[in-house]
Amino acid sequence: MLKQKKSKKGVFITLIGVVALLALTVVLENVLDPTKNIMLFTVLKKGAVYALVASSMNLLNGFTGLFSLGQAGFMLLGAYAYAIFTIPNSARENVYYLYGGSAIHFSLPELFGGGAVGLILGVLLALILAGIVAAAVAWLIGLPVLRLKSDYLAIATLGFAEIIRAVFQWDKLGPVTNGANALKSYPTFSSFNIPGGLRLSTAVAFLMAAVCIAIILLLINSSYGRAFKAIREDEVAAEAMGINLAKHKRLSFCISSFFAGVGGGMFAMFANQVQAKTFTTALTYEILLIVVIGGIGSISGSCIASFLYVACSEWWLRFLDEEHFIGTFKLPLMRNGFRMVVFSVIIMIVVLFFRRGIMGDKELPDLFQKRKPKPGAPVGKEGAK
Amino acid sequence: MQYALSIFLSGISLGGQYALIAIGYTLVYGILRLINFAHGDVFMVAGLMMVYLSTALPLWLALPLMLVLTVALGFAIERAAYKPLRSAPRMSVMISAIGVSYLLQNLATYITGGLPKSYPELPFLSDSVVIGGVSTKWVTIVTPFLVIALVFALTQLINHTKVGMAMRAVAKDFETSQLMGIKINSVISMTFVIGSFLAGVGSMLYFSNYPSIVPLSGALPGLRAFVAAVFGGIGSVPGAVVGAFIIGMSESVIKGSPFSIFSDAFTFALLIVILVVKPTGLFGEKVTDKV
Amino acid sequence: MKRKVLAMFLAVALIFALAACTGGNDGDKGASGEKVVRIGVFEPSTGDSGPGGKQEMLGMQYANKETPTVEVGGETYKVELVYADNGSDSAKAPTAAAELVGKDVALVLGSYGSGVSMAGGPVFEENGLAAIGVTCTNPGVTAGNDYYFRICFLDPFQGTVLANFAQEKFSAKKAYLLGELGNDYDQGLLTFFEQAFDGEVVKDSFPTNTSDFSTYLNKAQAEGCDVIFCPVSIAYSTQIVKLAASMGLETPILGSDTLDSNMVLDAAKGSSVKLYVSTFYQEGGAPEFDSGIKAWLAEDSTAMTNNGGNDTIAAVTAMGYDAYYTALEALKAAGSVDKAAVKAALPNVTYTGVSGAIAFDETGDAIRDTAYIKTADTANNVWALEATQTVK
């Protein structure tokens, strides 16, 4: 009973926090000069997208214990699905110029009558479709692959992501995927800025990510989530407890892919263009590192880590790439590429010395609960493992 | 006919080079149950070291020094990035491997400035030779023989020496062998030393054939070699070699076909089929789940 | 407890840092009070296109050294180049573009590579910042983006020029086309070449990071192709040319502007490879510029390294040089360093640079009808002018 009360309180705090955050982004974006602070908003948007994708990966890797490296592939599916369904008809000729127009002759925002309503409904539906496409493919892939164990699963999903990428780059599919060319001209986050009025692009990104992450959290705290965790701790024991392993693994895999697909769609909205070569294994690794830095098994950790990761790699450490002088003394080492070196060293330090990441397996609200550790009980150590 | 021969030659030499990398994967996996993602990058760094060493030193000195440094690098990576995580969950170690790979790539980008580097011409190996009307380099011909010789030496080492026996014991059962008084850490280091040495030799052969190195040069051969190791049954040295030749051959054949854009996809498809049909690979031992 | 504190600290630090960094971007005045105008350089210095991006930046840097000030509206401004590395990666390009916007530049030059330009374009457009594409040849860069201009020719033009050249010079009936899988630059050119080429083509794509090209070249030979067309990035083209050299390949290799680099030339050195590239500029076209930049390269060792270790001038360097002066012209025409004024002035800017006359049409593309075709003189390790091609 006590546990339940606590989690209710946690949900409440989280909710307030999220609403406050949303309000803050709206205020910030409209008060601050959008040109001077463009890096802030860019980082916030990208961070929100990454937070969603990292949470989806955490659901699979952290909560179900299935080590999958296919996230980039599912993002690709989502991004393409989103872009293909939302490019305005008038722009299709231009975008698919190598193939003399697209094989698809409708655009969701226009189907809903265009304008603000069409935009909102169209984008929402396209994002959901993006998720469904990714989940459907995940279901198919899962049939053979989910029988594999740990590393083998990782390498098989990685392989599938590469196969998906090759298929999307195939020029025979050009009228649909635009081959090697980028898809562009579809609605992005900036489309949500009301001309001459409120700027909402960052808030929209936050809202979308927050809703999806909330659903993931609800799922984790449901009976399904408990089953996932049981599978993570001990498959054999979980099966003995009456948990249908195949069903739950598939469910987790598909849901994770669904949100990766939605995240992919949002990534497309952020990046202004979709091109298959963006979604490489390196992207999966990036997301995986975020999950690790945040703490495997902590959604709030993944969220915090996404913003930190994006801000560090794209913004705060950029000064390392430039040459600096103190008087006439040229600081050594600082030149192009140094940023990424420093960054990867930081990552190694986190991986080696702060293995449990920022949050461990705790969530943010847990930190507000006063719970004195029993004397003698191990704290912050890898307990049961 | 000439075309078929050229595809065959390219497949064989690719296979041989993949084999040398794949052994590194398979040995490490056999003992630590770790996919050493950084192995492909060690291979790349070995190539870069050769580039820089050969500008300063004569070749006969640069070559052994490159091998020594590559071995040292492999050893250092194990000590710094994997050893502290010995008791951690397997996922942490794998992530650490990904981190090392990331670090090596970024370091290489920083040092080379992102410019492609040309591998030095090695006497004899880089010379051209014409076989059956197909022009190729000596290295293509030499590779399979060198690989077979090295693998023979390695199997001798594993089967007939004390170190080899210890390696086999550790691979069989990590904890029990520790109880039997085997110095686990030195055995593991030995594995990395052997793996890195072979990667160094492999990089020499590979880059003599394809003499341009960029920071990502190791990623693709690394991944393919890993697939080869899984294909042959991870943990088994002959398996890795056979797997590597099959992967190299099929890659070459696919590239020669009208479906060349699927050469990578095909490699992975092959891997998935093998994993699903025979999860332990061609020569792998069956493992049972312990409760 | 420690962890809890750490987590709290990080969370708070994050919020504060994000908020604090917002006000920090005003340094428009130079150190000594002189007026400064900033020009953004949106170029890759890492990744696949890194070598090309660096050579392009060399042109801008040299031009900046040559003419470090500009007269705008009766006042003298010091020109400062502000760099943002887009890493040849279209996922990183929007942030790099945003960084330039945030640094308050008057206009942007770049990029080498069309994919990154297309990814960064909407960011510039949204923030009302004009960009001058230097060597991004894909039609998609300027199409549908009012803020993107460019001073180079386009892929449909380049593809046609090379296809015509192949037919005129070699009476080619069959061509082998090779490009990187999923690279819009390569694939676009291949398609335009195919469309303009009156004959049979065999088309192949290799996956990213490939280093074994022997099968492809052998295939071209086995298929009996008369020419090989491989408009690939410098990293791949050096490998292909080197391989062709060691194989003693007799089929001529045609390349696009990316292959016009001394690194590719070096790869062909001393061999019997027949290499032809289409490009924007031929060394010797502007002797004063040539000798000036050579002297600068000899002085500056970093610049020399970035140029691949010798002083052969790449066409992209000349284009970077012209782009810088076009930008200065735009500033002068605008009479202000305000980005909106610069954007308004740009469409009417004309400039005659080392690579020819520059003027923009209504989509913002350069009005150009000439491409130079150069061939590698492998014995002397220099480029020799083969033909000047025009397409109506």
Image: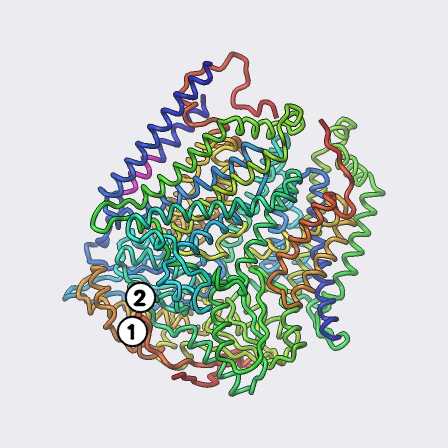
Residue furthest top in the image: A375
What subunit carries mark 1?
C
At horizontal 79% and vertical 60% (from top left) the residue drawn is B145
Q: Position of residue A233 (x, y in %)?
A: 61, 27
Q: Quadrant of the N terminus of chain C?
A: top left
Residue A180 appears in the figure:
no
Residue extent of the magenta highlight:
C15-22
Identify the image quadrant of residue A90: bottom left
* Left or right: C125, with C281 as reference point: left
Tell me the CA gap for discs 1 and 2. 23 Å
Kindly state the secondary structure of the residue where label 1 is placed: loop
What subunit carries mark 2?
C
Residue C16 is covered by the magenta coloring: yes
Q: Position of residue B12 (x, y in %)?
A: 74, 62
Q: Position of residue A198 (x, y in %)?
A: 23, 45
Residue closer to the observer: A266 or C373: A266
Q: Which amino acid is tagged 1?
A: Phe
Q: Is residue C19 above or below residue C252?
A: above
- Residue C360 tag number: 1
Q: Position of residue A226 (x, y in %)?
A: 54, 26
At horizontal 53% and vertical 26% (from top left) the residue drawn is A223
Residue C221 appears in the figure:
yes
- Residue identified by numbered label 2: C64
Q: Could you confirm whether marks 1 and 2 are on the same chain?
A: yes
